[in-house]
Image (cartoon, helix red, strand yellow):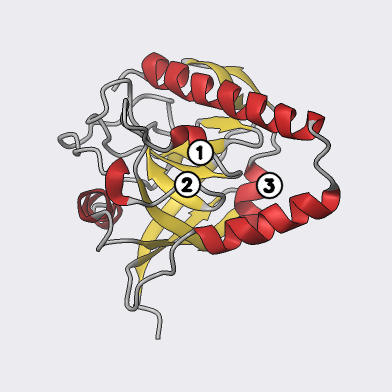
Amino acid sequence: MSCAALAATLLVAAQAADRNRRAAQQAGESSGAQTTQETATASAAPDIEANAPRVRLTTSEGVFVIALYPQRAPLSTANFLRYVDEGFYANTLFHRVIGNFVVQGGGFSAADESAKPTHEFVANESGSGLRNVRGTVGAARSENPHSASSEFYINIADNPDLDPLPTRWGYAVFGRVVEGMDVVDRMGTVATGSVGPFKKDSPLKPIVIQKAERLPPAK
């Protein structure tokens, strides 16, 4: 996977999302309307299925839990759990943070910022109906729509520009943060810049995934 290509595609989506937000603000969106929008966002993400797999990520910024959608995104879910079960994510970075957009990680070693070897790519499941709303987790990829591997991102805002259109593939959602979204929000506010191989949007103080582990099914 090309880090530069992925950065370019996410940057385009981030710019589009920013234009949409500015247009809404210029239209006179009130704080009350924003509160209504946040409430709508909370209901936009589908309910977590009974006995859905859950993964706890322990990071240098704190702990959060992701619940997965194996029925809606079976390939992406199985791929993510494969890396979790292999211990792949231990000591990897959240290497990209774009404020009010996404945090992204799971592909680069915290020891030397090198890309870790990954398994085969996963087919794009962005047509599942799962939307890129705040708190959802998706499969990061390059410009090739079927190039997702270990990297994932978390939406820290509603990002409809990442959803599919009839004329193009989107970015596949496969989970949702169900505990610790405040930790993810905190990640989204850190200072960023050029660090090592990352030309922009990389945390100046590394955000490290210390451990990713499955949890027992919720009762």
In the picture, residue 40 is in which quadrant? bottom right
**Residue beneath disc 2:** 209
Q: Nearer the viewer, mark 1 or mark 3?
A: 1
Query: Which residue is under mark 3?
Result: 186
Q: Residue at x 59, y 61 (%)?
A: 42
**116 w.r.t. 79: above or below:** above
State how far apart marks 2 and 1 are (Cα): 27 Å
Badge 1 crowding class, 10 Å Cα cut-off, few under 14, some 14 to 19, many 20 or more, is some
Alpha carbon distance from label 1 to label 3: 22 Å
* Helix, strand or loop at mark 3: helix
**Amino acid found under the numbered disc labelled 2:** Ile
Question: Which residue is under mark 1?
Answer: 160
Of mark 2 and mark 3, the one earlier in the sequence is: 3
Q: Earlier in the sequence, mark 2 or mark 1?
A: 1
User: With respect to residue 23, does 3 lie above or below?
Assistant: above
Q: Which mark is residue 100?
A: none
In this view, 212 is above or below 200: below
The one of 64 and 153 positioned closer to us in this rendering: 153
